[in-house]
Image (cartoon, rainbow, N blue to C red):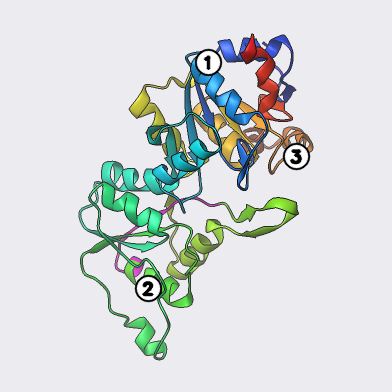
Amino acid sequence: MSGAKCTRLSGTLIKQVLDSVDSVLFDCDGVIWRGDQAVPGASEVINLLKKHGKKVFFVTNNSSKTRKLYADKMSLLGFNVTEDDVFGTAYCCALYLRTVCQLQGKVYLVGSDAMKQELEAVGIQQTGVGPDPISGKHADWANVPLDPEVKAVVVGFDEHFSYMKMNRAMQYLNQGCLFVGTNRDSRLPLEGGKAVPGTGCILQAVEAAAQREAQTVGKPNRFMFECVASQFGVEQERCLMVGDRLDTDILLGSNCGLKTLLALTGVNTVADALEHQRSGCPKRQGMVPDYYVESIADLLPALRE
């Protein structure tokens, strides 16, 4: 196999790379689907990889869906997937609090109903989901009622995020609560070149207010891979990470010693990767993939053999 980084994966090299791995991790949006449409050929790629005996998993920074909702969506799009194959930040955050933090107490949750469900599934109670309208004056805000059983503040994607939620999170954090965020993606890319603010914007607002930095569990943090590896015995040297974002997917792969493949159906381009490669900056080198493809459908010829 080529030792050069950012090599186009084609021809006989595809089979060489696939033969060198037992497990493949896929990002979701921009790799296997775009919006509500599967990337052409993606479901066949996933299903054939499994047929060839590869372990296939899905790792997403999106905290707005439970594992079950993701698996249901994939099934509708033709993917042969079970709930156990999916690792979202809502689930991984719950695991982090239960296993690493060994949290004893409730969570103040700036996040979605999906996060609430994943926390409750591991026995963690939460408060905070839904709107939190503002009332009163500054002194009232600084003395907002707090639940004494809350021992951690968790920040994910929250469509109801508000000044009062930021304030309430700050007051809990000022009391020394644990501080965990799902991910730092600042923008959610949409079809047609549009984008909306991502979880990273919400997390940064809370961090600025509390003057504290959160521990994040999502990509590119190693914990996301460790969740998969510990449950399914994945070996890092025989694992391929496939994604469309250099600063999350590819950097996760680099951080964990995985082979990395950039799919050009989403956010980043080969030009972006080459810019990182030429920068001379060690951190940016971690965002240079080993290989790239126009689409994961480019793997089909080798899989159909």
Task: State which tag comes first along the sequence, 2 or 1.
Answer: 1
Q: Residues within 10 Å of mark 3 (few under 14, many from 20)?
A: some
Residue 43 sits in quarter: top right
Q: Which residue is mark 3?
A: 272
Instruction: Tell me the amino acid under the disc marked 3.
Output: Asp
Dots 2, 3 in contact, CB < 8 A:
no
Asked if residue 112 is positioned above or below residue 271 in the image, the reply reads below
Residue tagged 1? 21
Task: Specify the segment rendered in magenta.
Answer: 173-184
User: x, y (%) of residue 31?
Assistant: 62, 36
Residue 163 location in percent, x, y?
A: 47, 76
Q: Is residue 259 visible?
A: no
Between discs 2 and 3, the one toward the N terminus = 2
Question: What label does residue 168 carry, if any?
Answer: 2
Which badge, 3 or 1, is on the more N-terminal residue?
A: 1
Label 1 crowd (10 A; few <14 / some 14-19 / many >=20): some
Which of the 4 image quadrants contains residue 110?
A: bottom left
Image quarter (top left, top right, bottom left or bottom right) of the N terminus: top right
Spatial CA distance of label 2 from label 3 is: 39 Å
CA separation in Å, label 3 and label 1: 26 Å
Q: Is residue 45 magenta?
A: no
- Residue reaching furthest to the right: 271
Element class at badge 1:
loop
